[in-house]
Amino acid sequence: MRAPSPLGRRAVLAGSTALVFALTALPAGAAGHQAHHRGSLVLIGGGLKDDNTQVYGEIIKRAGGAKARIGVITASSVPASQDPDAGDPDNCSNSACNGAHYAQLFKKHGAADAQWIPIDLDHIANADSEAVVEQVNSMTGFFFGGGDQYRYVTTMLHGAAHSDSKVLAAIRAKLATGAVVSGSSAGAQIAAGADMVTGGDSYQALRDGSTPGYFEDPTRLGYLPEGGFGFLRSGLIDTHTGANGREGRALRLAADTGHDRVYALEENTALVVDNPGTAREALSVLGTQGVAVLDLRHARARQADGGWSLTGARYTYLTDGDRYDAHRRLATPAPAKRPLIPLGTRPVAANGDAFYSVTNADGSPYSLRTTARQLVETRAQRTATATTFETGPRFTVTLTKTPRSAGWTTEPGKAQSIDSLTVAISPQ
């Protein structure tokens, strides 16, 4: 199985956004879906490696360990009819091929069984098949693969009503009674509620704002007001965040749509959510990178002649073993981590590509995170700035330490996790 190829996009809707507003703590969720679950979510920011025993093991453990039966859904992939290599098992990249690949991986990592749930653009009717519902009901956990999250919308939800297919209703019921629902990349993104992102790059998002819809232009910030499946309600979700420099688009979308929090997931790393959608929602991080929590409760956005600006947002970056109480908005470090004592005396390095622009051949991924870590590590300054590579206008991102700001680490002098830097974005 090869990695999915770039996806075509089709234009849908156009709309406008408010110009000047104060952000309020509006709930993130799609109306009509029950949000209270006894089960759990394991959401991966994409790039899940086949040998990630930590994340695969967590999914299997929550699905019953050695008795785990995992249903694999890959409807976000192209169907076999659109894959020119469908007959080549070494090069195919379609839903059935990808489903078999993940099923094999789950068995390799210790699941008792793993099966492809046969729903895709070639088999949309299966989303309401009683036989497939019966297959779903025999599972103890589910995994949604990557690709294009909009394909999950078109295959597993019904039209303008955005109502559940029978299969999705069955998965929702399994989650409510204790099953684990997991997913990577688009499979994590589809867990979002209202205003799920459909695409866009950070610079274009800051410059042009967001528009409801799904667009051919991959740089245009689009979103679905009706959202995804609504499994997670306490914030928006974004994926591949630092690797693709998506912090800017995540902040702009949240500001435009009135959300006060974004979980920005990194690659090969999971956000584990217990009791999703309840007042007891508890989150933790597993993996090699981390999860940024972008908090906009006290943020204010403004559109002026010079461009869009944002003040008062907060940036928290959690890594392996850290926990986050969504209700109290409280981050707690892993037991092995200790408060970071800043030892650095050098100024933070200049950063001329805050969001890893695709037009910058010399850009570095995880750019904004690197600046944030360097700021926490140094005692030489209280603020640090990073600018966008693009101009017209060029945006400046300012990170500032506050009395609440902290770093946590297992290595003296090196920040691994970060709590509560403030974020401001302004045009030049």
Image: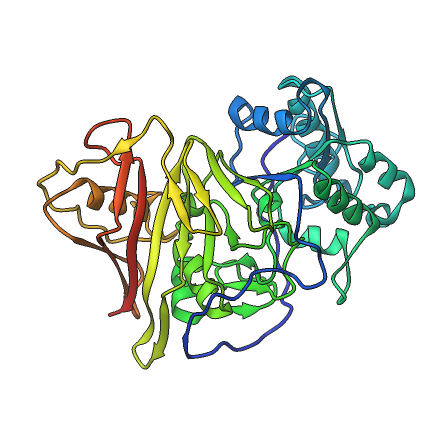
Q: Which residue occupies 61% across, 57% down?
A: 193
Question: How was this image coloured?
Answer: rainbow
Instruction: Compare residues 413 and 198 and report the one nearer the observer.
Output: 413
Residue 64, picture quadrant: top right
Residue 162 vs 149, above or below: the answer is below
Q: Could you tell me which quadrant the C terminus lies in? A: bottom left
**Left or right of 295 on screen, residue 62:** right
Instruction: Compare residues 343 and 108 and report the one nearer the observer.
Output: 343
Q: Position of residue 426 (x, y in %)?
A: 28, 68
Q: Could you tell me which quadrant the N terminus lies in? A: top right
Instruction: Compare residues 400 and 217 and report the one nearer the observer.
Output: 400
Q: Which residue occupies 58% across, 49% down?
A: 189
Residue 74, picture quadrant: top right
Q: Position of residue 176 (x, y in %)?
A: 71, 44
Residue 242, picture quadrant: top left
Q: How many numbered marks have been drawn onto this rendered protein structure?
A: 0
The residue most toward the right is 130
